[in-house]
Image: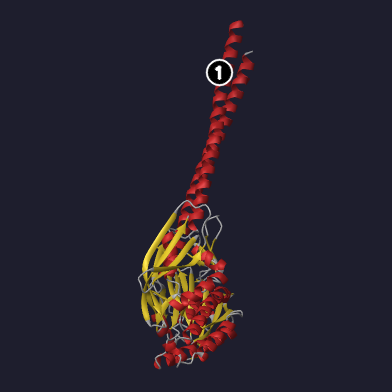
């Protein structure tokens, strides 16, 4: 009988221990989940701040904004962003034009500018991190270009490729107007992580005297197995699009944004065309010839129906210059102008 | 013999009682956990929804900076000035690009008013996308300049935006 009671008592203690352990595990699981949810809640707030920053950039062009994301990293695609550490889905922005690297660590720096073709048509936003370094190889063009870049980004003009060693940067981008160096010329940077070390070669094709408001090509290179490997090329048509190319992770990122920009530009040019047609009928504009500028606007609209690529961008650049000249002519003869 | 049997049974009952209490505590703990987690998830979901919806002021400011409507001189926008001919064309474009503008303005109604020669405000609805069952409605109205290219005159006008939530 005493043995039976002993067994029963031992069993009860085991039972109590099991239940106790289950409660302990439950409590630990609960606390872990609370911590996880608290983090998720913070990431949702971080997303909200990023989205607000994007809107503020949109409202105040040529303004710079900085946002400390308290350790959260931002992953970007051309039409969405998400917090790297978060499990929640990405926030999409189908009608915003954001040029950035694919990952922004810790702090966000934003800037915006108008794409001018030739009137201010759409706002482009640029995002990056102060921990991404932009290094411009010393040249006349580099010195001009750097003056147009936002103040807050981490940028330097270097006299030689070996003159920089990374301390806290997670991405480094070299920008040159000259020849492509070999990776071994980069000094201590030669051992930087593949893919995070990129190089851009800018080539001004037309109107060097107007640089950076000229037409040109930007070639993307990425360090891979000790060599710079070409990853694509894009074309720029003004200062804003050149800055967009410098900020963009890749040529795909750049053209993906331009695929969204073209329909938006189409609306703007449709409105401009209607406005010019209406103005041409006014008594005060009877002596003015609007056929040329309306024709150019029409040609611009037909280019915007195509896919963004080097051919359409070159045509857009050429039309933009023609519209600018025609607008100046209308102004000189005291006719209502396009912009 | 009988006494020890009674004592063993009592001890057994006491242990069972403890075990039941622990079991109930565990069950309460599980129920509480499920309740709290579902509340957290619900709160987080609504928080997530908020983050992708523009607030009223943002929507209004975006409208204020639409390049397709603004007056410009040599490429420089004139603050609070709207081009009369652009506004006319915009009415057509907004219908043709309905989805695009619905995405930008959301549930709202945009009205532009212009004073005629006798000082009466003539209003025209530019965009109207009402929310059938809205909780809140915000009304923003402020004076603007409407530039008339024909008369080369800057007329006084009013821009009104109703925002539904």
Residue at the spot x=53%, y=85% of the render?
Answer: A297
Picture quadrant where residue A108 is located: bottom left
Picture quadrant where residue A23 is located: top right
Task: Residue A24: give x, y in percent of width and height.
Answer: 53, 36
Task: Residue A150: give x, y in percent of width and height.
Answer: 40, 75
Picture quadrant where residue A233 is located: bottom right
Residue B117 higher or lower than B37, as above or below: below
Check the image and name the residue furthest to the front.
B118
How packed mark 1 is, by other alpha carbons closer than 10 Å (few <14, some 14-19, many 20 or more), is few
Is B52 or A217 nearer to us in this picture? B52
Residue at the spot x=44%, y=69% of the render?
Answer: A58
Residue A220 higher or lower than A321, as above or below: above
User: Which quadrant of the figure contains the C terminus of chain A?
Assistant: bottom left
Can residue A54 be seen in the rendering of this structure? no
The type of colouring in the image is secondary structure
Residue A102 higher or lower than A290, as above or below: above
Can residue B108 be seen in the rendering of this structure? yes
Residue position marked by numbered label 1 in the rendering: B14
User: Which quadrant of the figure contains the N terminus of chain A?
Assistant: top right
Task: Residue B32: give x, y in percent of width and height.
Answer: 52, 36
Is A299 or A91 nearer to us in this picture? A299
Across the whole image, how many numbered discs are drawn on residues?
A: 1
Task: Residue B16: give x, y in percent of width and height.
Answer: 58, 21
Q: Name the side, left or right, on which B84 lies relative to B93.
A: left
Q: At numbered mark 1, what does the secondary structure look like: helix, strand or loop?
A: helix
Is A136 or A144 nearer to us in this picture? A144
Please report, as a chain letter, where disc 1 is located: B
């Amino acid at each position: 009988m005493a043995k039976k009671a002993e067994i029963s008592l031992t069993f009860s203690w085991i039972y109590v221990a099991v239940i106790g352990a289950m409660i302990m595990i439950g409590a630990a699981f609960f606390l872990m989940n609370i911590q996880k949810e608290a983090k998720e809640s913070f990431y949702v707030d971080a997303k909200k701040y990023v989205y607000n920053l994007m809107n503020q950039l949109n409202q105040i062009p040529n303004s710079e904004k900085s946002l400390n994301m308290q350790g959260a990293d931002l992953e970007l695609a051309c039409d969405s962003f998400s917090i790297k550490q978060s499990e929640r889905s990405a926030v999409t922005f189908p009608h915003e034009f954001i040029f950035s690297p694919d990952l922004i660590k810790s702090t966000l720096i934003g800037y915006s500018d108008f794409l001018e073709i030739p009137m201010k048509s759409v706002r482009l936003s640029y995002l990056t991190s102060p921990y991404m370094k932009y290094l411009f190889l010393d040249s006349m063009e580099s010195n001009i270009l750097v003056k147009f870049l936002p103040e807050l980004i981490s940028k330097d003009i270097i006299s030689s490729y070996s003159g920089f060693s990374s301390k806290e940067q997670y991405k480094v981008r070299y920008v040159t107007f000259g020849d492509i160096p070999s990776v071994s010329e980069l000094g201590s940077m030669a051992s930087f992580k593949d893919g995070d070390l990129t190089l851009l070669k800018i080539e001004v094709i037309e109107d060097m005297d107007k640089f950076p408001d000229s037409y040109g090509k930007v070639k993307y290179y990425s360090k891979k197995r000790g060599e710079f490997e070409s990853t694509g090329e894009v074309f720029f048509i003004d200062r804003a699009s050149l800055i967009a190319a410098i900020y963009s992770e890749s040529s795909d990122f750049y053209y993906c944004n331009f695929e969204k920009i073209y329909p938006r530009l189409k609306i703007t040019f449709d409105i401009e065309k209607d406005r010019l047609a209406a103005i041409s009928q006014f008594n005060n504009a009877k002596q003015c010839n609007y056929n040329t500028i309306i024709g150019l606007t029409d040609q611009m609209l037909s280019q915007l129906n195509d896919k963004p690529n080097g051919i359409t961008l070159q045509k857009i650049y050429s039309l933009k210059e023609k519209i600018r000249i025609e607008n100046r002519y209308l102004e000189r003869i005291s006719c209502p102008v396009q912009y | 013999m009988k006494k020890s049997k009674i004592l063993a049974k009592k001890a057994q009952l006491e242990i069972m009682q403890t075990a039941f209490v622990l079991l109930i505590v565990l069950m309460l703990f599980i129920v509480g956990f499920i309740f709290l987690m579902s509340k957290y998830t619900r709160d987080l979901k609504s928080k997530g929804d908020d983050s992708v919806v523009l607030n009223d002021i943002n929507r209004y400011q975006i409208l204020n900076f639409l390049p397709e409507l603004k007056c410009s001189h040599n490429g420089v926008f004139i603050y609070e000035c709207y081009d009369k001919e652009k506004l006319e064309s915009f009415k057509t474009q907004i219908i043709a690009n309905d989805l695009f503008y619905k995405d930008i303005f959301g549930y709202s109604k945009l009205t532009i008013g212009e004073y005629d020669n006798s000082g009466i405000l003539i209003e025209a609805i530019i965009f109207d996308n009402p929310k059938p069952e809205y909780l809140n409605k915000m009304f923003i109205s402020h004076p603007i300049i409407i530039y008339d290219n024909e008369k080369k005159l800057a007329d006084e006008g009013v821009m009104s935006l109703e925002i539904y939530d």
